Image: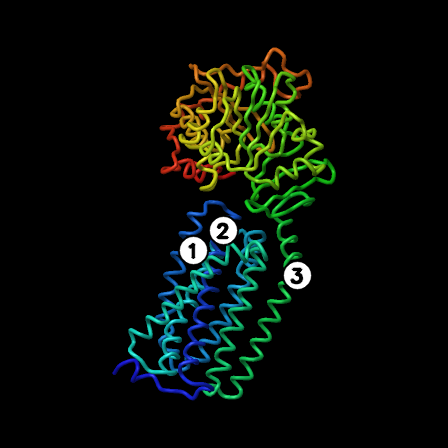
Amino acid sequence: MSTAEAARPIALPMKPGPARFFVLLAVFICASCGMVYELALVALGSYLLGDTIVQASIVLAVMVFAMGIGSLATKRLTEFAAVSFALIEAALGVIGGLSVILLYLAFAFADVYTVAMVAMAFVIGALIGAEIPLLMELVQRIRAQKASSAVADLFAADYVGGLIGGLAFPFLLLPLLGLPRGALAVGMTNTVVGVLIVLWLFRTELARTSQALLAALLVLIVGGLTVVWVFTDDIEVTTRQRLYRDPIVHSQRSDYQEIVLTEAPKTGDTRLYLNGDLQFASVDEYRYHESLVHPLMNGPRRKVLVLGGGDGLAVREILKYPDVESVTLVDLDPAVLELARSSEHFTDFNGDSLDDPRVHTIAADAFTWLRDAEHPRYDAVIADLPDPDDVATSKLYSIEFYGLIRQVMSSEARLVVQAGSPFFAPEAYWGIGQAVAEAGLSTTAYHVDVPSFGDWGYFLADLAGPGPEVGLPQDAPDDLRFATDEVLAASTTFPPDRDRASVDEAKASTLLHPRVLDQERGAWVGY
């Protein structure tokens, strides 16, 4: 017996043609909602954990698998297709709408984010998969047709809806509503469309009690999601504070990252976090920045290029040398640059360095900026970039990136690279040094103790070989609090368990083989 013969016709409030159009419209809207849920899970995982590829792979794989399970499980519900579809869309609206907030809570309070994300992706995927068999049944009851034609119409509406949802997520929902409220808005839309289409077109399929219960459920869900919408900011602030030791004094989500500043009430220690990763602690940042900058300045320094370092702290150290004529700072996020100029939590420590007339700031991706334009030759280059713990930052530790830097270095120029911890992440540290070397530069490794970070390492490099000496310039400032000739001389010595020989093979990272990601993932274990 064919599908068209098996489906029993129903009484409709309009002709079959328009009724069928509205069902397909509902398919279109619900598919858009489903795509947004999927992208929201990927985006949240990327925000919280980094590594978009891993997060996307997990979410997509689990959801596609769950869609198959949901489709199989729904075969028994086709006899009650209308009410089952309404309940499934209501469940999707609640779970999808709350997914971002629930997972953020799981991340902050229970440390079970990955398990919760997999469970959430499975449930949402199963509910999405359950839609098609039920919709197929409803479409056939409106007007019987060949199964192939019905499937083609449903999938066309479904796939086009997915396209619209995929485009609306980054270009409409995130800019206008943000991630938590964007998911809530989609959840409400999903619920309203799914339940109303049944209450309107298929009401003859429902008993009066069922109609009343579905209407009450619709009001309850929309009302509940609205309440959560109202308190979203409070929930987010409370949950975010849970992630940080000290009170948050400033937080914002820029176009690129979450920016959080904390300040300890007793000590005044101010800390900057980008996407949850510590960037500096005011109590000891001078150790990091003095060690980063001053060995580099023991050479040509008339024109200095800083890649990263949007907080202005490295620039503060550079400007201590009066013979520096210009500093070009390239940082991805204009929001960080603006804070570094305007917030007392920055200017108290960077000394208003970004307002110095010698400093020119550029808001751009360092890799793209180096590649896409002609640049002058620089005498000194600082790569003060975020740790390579996601795909976006891994390219900034590749052979190709250091090759681009080499092209803007003068013949006697020096480069310094912050390279992470040789103690906690030795494979990543020595791999970064290998990438610098394979780009054609001679390197000298050194490391110092920065209490808020731990044992932290750098590579000083030049084009001459065999590698520049790590030391202070003769005219180094008198106000240095950490870097001395003795400290820097000792910094080039590594213990046997963390020296170059302790790593079997230091593998350089490239654009096509971002090995530094795997090296970072294998680091910090047990700490």
| Towards the viewer: 352 or 41 | 352
Q: Amino acid at mark 3?
A: Phe
Alpha-carbon span between mark 1 and mark 3: 27 Å
Q: Amino acid at mark 2?
A: Gly
- Under circle 1, the secondary element is helix
- Colour setup of the view: rainbow
Q: Name the residue located 37 percent from the left edge and 60 percent from the top edge.
A: 64
Q: Amino acid at mark 1?
A: Val
The mark nearer the N terminus, 3 or 2, is: 2
Mark 2 highlights which residue? 45
**Residue sitting farthest toward the right:** 266
- Under circle 2, the secondary element is helix
Quadrant of residue 472 in the image? top right
Q: Name the residue located 70 percent from the left edge and 33 percent from the top edge.
A: 347
The mark nearer the N terminus, 1 or 2, is: 2
Which dot marks residue 59? 1
